Amino acid sequence: MTESAIPDYLHTIPLPTPFPVGPVNVYLAEGEPLTLVDAGPRYAPAREALEAALAECGYRVADLRRIVLTHAHPDHCGLAAELARASGAEVLTHAANFPWLADDADARSMAFYREVMRWAGVPVEMLTGLTRWQRSAGRYAEPVIPDRALAEGDVLQLGGEDWHVLHTPGHAGGLICLYQPQRRLLISSDHLLRDISSNPLVEPPAPGETERPHRLVEYMAQLRRVAELDVALALPGHGLPITDPRALVRERLAFHEERARRVLGTLGDDTLTVHKIASALFPALDLINYFLALSEVIGHLQWLEVEGRVIHVERDGIAHWQALP
């Protein structure tokens, strides 16, 4: 089999979200076990749209037997606990997502991001607004305890076919894609998105570690890895299918290289905080997009630091960055 068409057993279900990114795609795989890949946010319009889409396929929520979460962001996992309660479905995801799905995840996450934003030199008034926004975003996801961990190299049966689990950290440390090699088909979640660049978000160190992960560095490595696979069609977490994944990867790599050059250009001969760099590159953003801009600038600075092109020093807990000659 060499075709790349979406198989009859796999259904794309777009669900509305309350976030600027717009609808999220979840995927229903018919067969045993009836599987939902991602769950959407805990948001009434998403719940109603999911129930309607299941009914159109001849199912109810109670018929679900397995829920696979590609990562632990609210638009992808928010309804998982509710769906599992209603159906008895087992919940599977990568082990790196477990801490983000736990009862105390919101409190730990908010504490971490307050620390990061202070380190980035964010002014107090913006810090207060970002903290308020993060607290409100938490209501779109209910904590859930996964039943089983998925890891790189695992194989899942969807529709009677073998799908390979790929661990692709970057946008999130626990993000997984699902790959069906005979069909040359990839469920890419937020690792590959056709119309928007996937933002590698700043995350806390893994349990037992002290260094903050370099998510953009990981993301670019995983982009190159996916480009080496034989993939003819990718089904993303948002937007339309990707018909030329390798070309898209080339675009994304070029985008991040250009953005790194812009970060260096903004630094010039100055010594600047992350906040000042982000504000110069992305003026007049709302709070959500400002947070994403901060995360992106931190990622590029980490990448440039690994390459020996910038350094930073900390004064009073705030990082100050400068370009190396």
Image (spheres, helix red, strand yellow):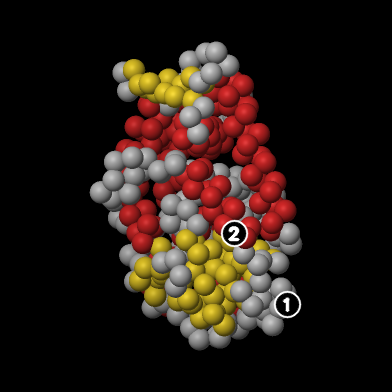
Q: Residues within 10 Å of mark 2 (few under 14, many from 20)?
A: many
Q: Residue at x 60, y 78 (%)?
A: 55
Q: Residue at x 31, y 18 (%)?
A: 316
Count of numbered labels shown in the rendering: 2
Q: Nearer the viewer, residue 114 or 189?
A: 189
Q: Please, what secondary structure does the residue beneath circle 2 have?
A: helix
| Relative vertical location of residue 215 with respect to residue 60 in this rendering, above or below | above
Kindly tell me whether residue 3 is visible in this rendering.
Answer: yes
**Left or right: 20 in relation to 172:** right
Query: Label 1, on which residue?
Result: 3
Give whichever of discs 1 and 2 has the lower sequence position. 1
**Which quadrant is the N terminus positioned in?**
bottom right
Residue 145 lies in what quarter of the image?
bottom left
Kindly tell me whether residue 291 is visible in this rendering.
Answer: no
| Relative vertical location of residue 199 with respect to residue 230 in this rendering, above or below | above
Residue 321 position, x and y percent, is 46, 21
**Left or right: 203 in relation to 240:** left
**Label 1 with label 2: CB-CB less than 8 Å:** no
Q: Amino acid at mark 1?
A: Glu
Q: Amino acid at mark 2?
A: Val
CA gap between label 1 and label 2 equals: 18 Å
Query: Label 2, on which residue?
Result: 226
Residue 19 position, x and y percent, is 56, 47
Residue 126 position, x and y percent, is 46, 25
